[in-house]
Image: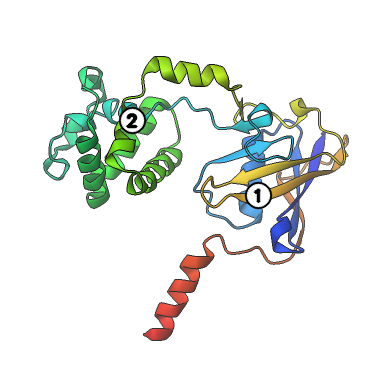
Amino acid sequence: MKTYTFHVSLPEYGRVWRKIELPAESTLENLHDAIQAAYDFDNDHLYSFFMSGKAWDRATEYSLPEDAGGWGDMLTITGVSEVTSMNEAAPEALDLEEAEDVAAPTTADMRTMFAALKDNPAMRDQFIQAFAQQTGLPAEMAEMMLGNIDTLMESVSDDQLDEILNITDQELEELDDDEEEAGDVRTTTIESLGLRKGKTFMYLFDYGDEWRFKVKVDAINKDAPDAEYPLLVEEVGEAPAQYADWEDEEGEEGEES
């Protein structure tokens, strides 16, 4: 069995690194999952690998494909944009088979719908499950995308939101034409990358906080023993808290009480 061992570090956090060994046929998604487990992160955000080592280098990027559609698609494929009052909506409102004739939502609709989804956990869960079913994405990824939209909606004005909602298919195609399509982490195997010992690249996790991991090919073993992979071969240093600010606030609240 052929395996690759990666030295994964966080340069901004001093002497903190992990060595992780995976089979050659493992995908970049498998490597992502292994790094998350090694650093005890929650695996709750989007991520990319940049083989050039430079963040946002589209030409060398591998990530999850952007084939889930835009915000309007998220609403129409789940039938949510039919709902005038989400808090009064029945479960039948999320009928996927009736979603094709749903009109694109307005800015006001978006504000109302997402506010209602935040206030109605049961409806939010139904929305996530319906979106995941329609797109083929894992429910966890659908939930992650919805959380990212919640955050973005809180930071954009109505005019900005209106521009996003009304972008045309032609404009999207022109944007796609200007950029090279990123590789798919789900189907890209480690072996297919032609990696050599000493090769370094970047694993960027969470597009908001931008955790920038340096990944180095530490070893390539063409005759590795059968084992339960991925293997955490070695770990040095304590992993930083993923949500340090939150944990500090919780600690302060505990002291006050």
Mark 2 or mark 1, earlier in chain: 2
On the image, which quarter does residue 257 sit in? Answer: bottom left
User: Is any atom of residue 74 visible in this view?
Assistant: no
Asked which secondary structure carries label 1, the reply is strand
Rendered location of residue 77, percent (x, y):
30, 25
Amino acid type, label 2: Glu
Residue at the spot 49% in from the left edge and 73% down from the top edge = 248
The disc label shown at residue 20, or none: none
**Distance between the alpha carbons at the discs numbered 2 and 1:** 31 Å
Residue 94 position, x and y percent, is: 22, 31
Give how far across and how far down residue 175 sits, in percent.
50, 21
In screen coordinates, is 33 left or right of 110? Answer: right
Residue that numbered label 2 is attached to: 163
> Where's the N terminus, which quadrant?
top right
Q: Amino acid at mark 1?
A: Arg
- The colour mode here is rainbow
Other-residue count near label 2 (Cα within 10 Å), few / some / many at <14 / 14–19 / ≥20: few
Q: Residue at x 53, y 45 (%)?
A: 207
**Closer-to-camera residue (242/94):** 242
Q: Give the x, y percent position of residue 183.
A: 63, 26
Which class describes the residues within 10 Å of circle 1: few (<14), some (14-19), or many (20+)? many
Can see residue 118?
Answer: yes
Image point (73%, 61%), residue name: 16
The numbered dot on residue 212 is 1
- Residue displayed at 83% across by 41% down: 225
